[in-house]
Image: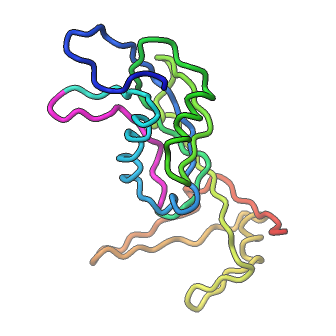
Amino acid sequence: VLRVVGRPATGTAPKTIRRIRVHFGKTGKFAFRGHLDLVRLLPRVFKRAGIALHYTEGFHPRPEMIFGPALPLGVYSIAEYVDVRIETDFELPNEQSVLSALNSVTESGLDFYRMRELDRKDPSLTKNAALATYLIGVPTSLTFGESTVDGVFLQDVVTKGSPLPDVIRQQGKITKTIQVSKFVHSLSLCDPS
């Protein structure tokens, strides 16, 4: 046990509040759990592991946690991050003991890989996240209505810089065109073998 969990009684000595960044992943069936489920689950995982989170003040206290961008439902990830504030009256134990405590009490598919303490000068997670890397499995031929996207088309996009097709969204009477190319930093094809 890393420390006794619970809100300190009124009049007790103040605890040191430390900011840590935790690297975790969502795989297997857990990838089908929504982001709000994760937001509700993580405080319970920390509590079960014996790590006291720092709570906001006011009428509705919540644990101070800052997540990276939410994943779409069903997308696996091995590079998710959350910044949490914890209360402790001593130095942080070593990284492996914290990670093993978290992994021993969590659900299958939610795995904790690394953590580190943040300084005051370290930027927040939302300011730090600029890019995401996706690995997408594409069959050799993919059909969308009457048009077919195949390896030749994808090869042209990668090697010749051909533009990606625009996505057209219809919301009621409003039609919105999204230029996908603006959001793609780089694109590469991998050999499936």
Residue 139: image quadrant is: bottom right
Q: Residue at x 44, y 59 (%)?
A: 33
Give the camera-side residue of 119 and 115. 115
Q: Residue at x 34, y 26 (%)?
A: 54
Q: Is residue 133 magenta?
A: no
Q: Residue at x 57, y 30 (%)?
A: 115
Residue 163: image quadrant is: bottom right
Part of the protein shown in magenta: 58-72
Residue 89: image quadrant is: top left
Coordinates of residue 75 in the picture (x, y in percent): 54, 61
Magenta stretch: helix, strand or loop mostly: loop
Taking the view exactly as shown, the residue that stands out farthest to the bottom is 146
Q: Residue at x 45, y 23 (%)?
A: 19
**176, above or below 14, in the image:** below
**129, above or below 164, in the image:** above
Coordinates of residue 69 in the picture (x, y in percent): 46, 47
Coordinates of residue 77 in the picture (x, y in percent): 59, 53
Residue 169 makes an appearance in the image: yes
Residue 129 makes an appearance in the image: no
Is residue 10 rendered to the left or right of residue 83?
Answer: left
Taking the view exactly as shown, the residue that stands out farthest to the right is 193
Colour basis: rainbow
**Count of number-bearing discs:** 0
Is residue 148 rendered to the left or right of residue 52?
Answer: right
Q: Which quarter shows the C terminus?
A: bottom right
Taking the view exactly as shown, the residue that stands out farthest to the left is 59
